[in-house]
Amino acid sequence: MRKSQRKVKDPLLISLIKALSEDRVTDGAAARRIYSKDASVIEGGRAGVICFPEDTAEVVKCVSLANEYDREFVTRGAGTGLAGGSVPCNDPIVIVTTRMKKIIDVDIEKKIAWVQPGVVNLDLSNFLKGTGLHFAPDPSSQQACTIGGNVANNSGGPHCLAYGVTNSHIAALEVVLPDSSIVQLGSIEGEARGYDLRGVFVGGEGTLGVATRIAVRLTEDPPEIATLLLDFSKITDAAETVSQIIANGVLPAALELMDRNVVAAVEPFAKAGYPLDAEAVLIAEVDGLPDGVSHEVGIITDIAINNGAREVRIAADEEERERIWKGRKSAFGAIAKIKPDYYLHDTVIPRGRLAEVIEKVYKIAETHDLVVMNVFHAGDGNLHPLLVFDARIPGTLEKVKKAGEEIVRISLEAGGVLSGEHGIGLEKQRFMSQQFSERDLEAQDALRRSFDPENRSNPHKVLPTGSSCGELNSLNEIPEGVWI
Amino acid sequence: MKSMEEFREEIGDTSFVSVRGGGTRWNLGGPLREGTIIVEAPKGVINYKPEEMIVRVGAGTKLSTLQDDLSELKQEVALAGFSESTVGGSLAVGSSSHRRARIGAACDVLLQADCVGADGKQFVAGGPTVKNVTGYDICRLLVSSLGTLALIGVVTLRTRPKPEIGVWLKGELDFGEIANCCYRPASVLYDGSKTFVFIEGYEADVEKERVFLEKVGMTVMDRALEIPPLQKGETKKDLNGGFLDLQTGDVYSNDANSNIEVSEEVQRLSNRIKQNFDPTGRLNPGRKPH
């Protein structure tokens, strides 16, 4: 990152160095290459100058200089995004928030923590251990992803089924708007009056400004947790079990499904005791007070057995529970060993149509002679079909893209939506007009223009633009810290 | 039931227009400009899918009617209101329940909205699934907007399991002491001298917590606490005979303070949103969400 041996000529670079410091600003080739990508399948991004601010004032300086030099800017956390949301187009200033990693204040009684955006999700929950509180959103990349990234993507995670996604856990935000002014959105003292600016900022994929301080709501640790491992000889039985659990008024903390291919990849590594001969494994977790937990375990067990579950195993202790979850959360890494390339999808469908749509996903993969693996948040209908392949074989990438388009199409036809947690980024812009009419998109654009009239903050993302700076490609390397 | 097309035609594309629900909080945000056309949103439950935990309903449907329908299958929506309140009205004012700490806020309830914009054209915000990060979340913008950005006709709402039982207790414990006695209480309200706690869940669990709370001095109330409406943006110094929610900081009061200041930046941002959604100011003219 240090550039003392090189003559600095670019006036923007000089200004940014003056505003931050020489060791926190770079336009070196290696850094530009690294920060031109995220964890998605999007290739072709181009980073300009890369900055590492440490506080709000420095972010203001970066954004002010973007305005002064008429440059776009892109904000980026750990780069674990899977839709190209932080892939830079057209040499923008890249504002990397990973040095903004202070846990500023924790108020145990009010259950609020103020954090900087670069705090890693799991670091916050680890910091809170012993307080009886935790930060509920737990994307599977939580060991690496930042809370600022969670805010940008309105991230989910296995335990968001009962507790809600990130938006439900953000009380207030300090934001540097694209014109470099600072604004506080939301409130930690009761609900704010007026337009829900906090609510719309969360999930804005970095296009509405830069969150520089985040007040997160903390959730009480449950007094009792039961983790169930259910195995099925048909994946459609597992899917039907999911539907019936919800229909019976039980909203588990988590309800995750893995198919045979995933189990085969994960079990040798995780040694979670997943049955290798099962067609599908369902992890159900319920929490709360003891009688309620016991009651819901009974309901889930009965439904599963009625739907042909071969075994219902309840984790006997915390160690077994952790092993079960280790397998689930390490699925992506394990899958990488099967084929050199992958493409992970993310759509949501009505829960009641899980069985039917999963069958169609297998059929699509078969038609295109591809291997598909399914590990997903079944409880909220959030599918993650993962196509694994070898891009060196001519024509394979084209088949993967075609299969991906068909998966999106069947999800929409089933009454679903384009994304449940990865966002639109660059990856799914081209599909937006399949879900929304022109007038629907105009309303979305009206919101965006309100925050960013000059279209300076992470432009070229989310809404269809008619052109894209990135190309869908395969990844042949699993980036560190990325899971489904 | 009135169709969206009929609703759209009534709204038109030129006149000042407002949608009236039950009128229970009609004056919130200031008086409506004289001469404004008043229309009503479609009424009735269109499609209830308990297995999906979603319900599609006309925004003009009475909230109590909807809650009764959902209750038959042990579900509810996390919206609050009065006997005449409509679903659309509750959404327009962002009427979260006093149980918000446990069941979530009004802004989490709206999944999809079929609306008519200021240009008289119909558009859809959000999507019909319980999880969705597809594009910008216009639904959140519509909740609490007092109908100043678009007029909501039909909505898809998130439902949730209705707890088996709920119990109100009152006493003089402080919040810390109550927190030690129960897990995720639904409400902990304070009126300036007494504390009121609402616990809910499975009967056996609630019974144990009730016994525990009684042992430390709380007493069971023989009827539900009457709670005035949520006054967003107000703080504990505005209590005026109402209640302060010790978990969320929300204030419930019959006194609505119309002089709550917002920052210049929030006002500027809000003005731009209004301008971009309703350039001629024809939707609910006179109403100021802040």
Image (cartoon, rainbow, N blue to C red):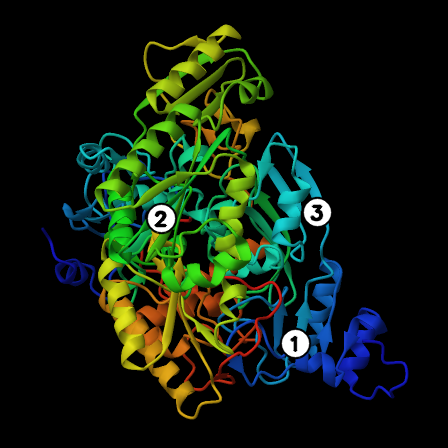
**Place of residue A110 in the rendered image (x, y in percent of width and height, measured from the top left):** 59, 33
Q: Secondary structure at mark 3?
A: strand
How far apart in space, not on screen, are marks 3 and 1 (Cα)?
A: 25 Å
How far apart in space, not on screen, are marks 1 and 2 (Cα)?
A: 43 Å
Q: Residue at x 48, y 29 (%)?
A: B184
Residue type at tag 1: Tyr
Q: Secondary structure at mark 1?
A: loop
Task: Tell me, for residue B146, which label it has, or none.
Answer: 2
Q: Nearer the viewer, mark 3 or mark 2?
A: 3
**Place of residue B32 in the rendered image (x, y in percent of width and height, measured from the top left):** 32, 47
Task: Tell me, for residue A103, which label it has, or none.
Answer: 3
Against A117, is A305 above or below? above
Pick whichever, B163 or A293, lies toward us: A293
Which residue in the structure is indicated by mark 1? A35
Q: Secondary structure at mark 2?
A: loop
Q: Earlier in the sequence, mark 3 or mark 1?
A: 1
Q: Residue furthest bottom?
A: A394
Local packing at callout 3 (Cα closer than 10 Å; few below 14, some 14-19, many 20+) is some
